């Protein structure tokens, strides 16, 4: 009995020493940034791989602090849209371990995402309505100087006297409108006086994509969308600044009819051609401050000139 009590006391002593040795703690801290933009990442998570319930999140400056018991750990750092990173660390008692992290972009081929059909992001293949999406690459490859030219690439959509017609569902009545809602980033573009859109207000050089709904959408957009919706979404600045300069020019052939060859007649000295120049620059200045500027200059000397002056015909 005496030996049993002695062994029990020794065991309790060893257990207390072991527990006491594990009560020491250390600190893991550092900074988390985006590897491309060098900007701090807010809300990135630092977790133990052995126990994901233990962790911390980075603050508004990308800093994190995690208090751990002494020992060796494997740490997981993750953030939505960026590649996760893992590293090992040995925590010693009353010591601070500094570890800074730079996460890379997680580039993936994503499906086309639209917002027009339900005013929230949806995959194009999951929609129950007929929709066409125009990408900015198509607009650039066609050397489009006005948005009407780009919209004519959509099957079933035509522009008649500045009024969009989708599958001929609204007929045509001048000045009444075509019942096709046109919105730019959710803001209606139809003018209140004439009921027709001001196409010149749309910046062709800064378009993310154009979503065209072929069908009634009055539940979401009102009575002006009885025949469809054209939603033009502007592009927001990315992590890297973007600058583009495009210039194009061309020449028309000389008309055969003398009445249409007005370039060299009646004192005119015009060039029978066209030229277009557009400039664009966008960048992120701070977390909540963006800078976007664009300009478009277009000159088109079409071969159809003004009508010839009336001739004085003697009366009989």
Image (cartoon, grey):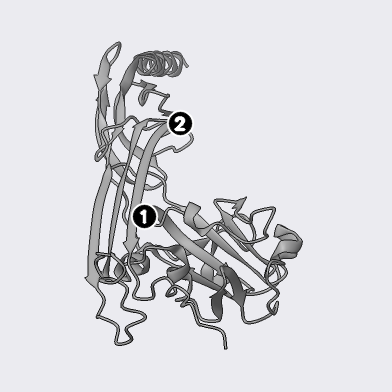
Can residue 291 be seen here?
yes
Q: Name the residue under label 2.
A: 54
Horizontal side, residue 265 vs residue 16: left or right: left
| Closest to the observer, 226 or 261 | 261
Instruction: Give me the C-alpha separation between circle 2 and circle 1.
Output: 48 Å
Q: Percent from the top left, x then y, of residue 134?
A: 44, 68
Q: Mark 1 points at which residue?
A: 205
Residue plotted at (52% across, 69% down): 124
Image-quadrant location for residue 214: bottom right
Horizontal side, residue 296 vs residue 95: left or right: right
Secondary structure beneath label 2:
loop
Can residue 45 be seen here?
no
Q: Percent from the top left, x then y, of residue 30?
A: 29, 23
Residue plotted at (35% across, 47% down): 295
| Closest to the observer, 232 or 197 | 197
Residue plotted at (43% across, 29% down): 57
| Closest to the observer, 20 or 207 | 207
């Amino acid at each position: 009995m005496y030996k049993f009590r002695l062994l029990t006391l020794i065991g309790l002593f060893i257990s207390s020493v072991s527990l006491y040795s594990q009560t020491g703690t250390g600190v893991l801290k550092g900074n988390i940034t985006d590897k491309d933009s060098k900007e701090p990442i807010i809300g990135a998570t630092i977790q133990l791989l052995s126990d994901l319930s233990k962790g911390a999140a980075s603050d508004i400056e990308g800093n994190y602090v995690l208090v751990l018991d002494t020992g060796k750990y494997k740490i997981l750092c993750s953030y939505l849209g960026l590649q996760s990173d893992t590293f090992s660390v040995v925590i010693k008692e009353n010591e601070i371990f500094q570890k800074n992290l730079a996460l890379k972009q997680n580039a993936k081929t994503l499906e086309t995402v639209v917002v027009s059909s339900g005013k929230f992001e949806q995959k194009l293949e999951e929609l129950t309505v007929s929709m066409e999406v125009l990408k900015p690459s198509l607009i650039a490859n066609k050397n489009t100087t006005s948005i009407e030219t780009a919209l004519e690439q959509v099957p079933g959509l035509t522009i008649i006297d500045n009024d969009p017609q989708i599958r001929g569902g609204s007929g045509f009545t001048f000045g009444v409108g075509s019942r096709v809602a046109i919105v730019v980033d959710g803001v209606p573009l139809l003018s209140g006086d004439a009921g027709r859109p001001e196409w010149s207000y749309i910046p062709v050089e800064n378009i993310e994509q154009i979503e065209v709904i072929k069908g009634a959408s009055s539940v979401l957009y009102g009575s002006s969308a009885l025949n469809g919706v054209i939603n033009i979404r502007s592009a927001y600045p990315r992590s890297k600044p973007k600058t583009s300069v495009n210039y194009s020019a061309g020449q028309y052939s000389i008309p055969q009819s003398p009445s249409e060859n007005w370039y060299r007649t009646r004192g005119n000295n015009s060039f029978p051609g066209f030229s277009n120049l557009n400039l664009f620059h966008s960048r992120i200045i701070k977390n909540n401050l963006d800078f976007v500027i664009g300009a478009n200059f277009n000159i088109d000397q079409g071969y159809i000139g003004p009508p010839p002056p009336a001739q004085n015909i003697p009366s009989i």
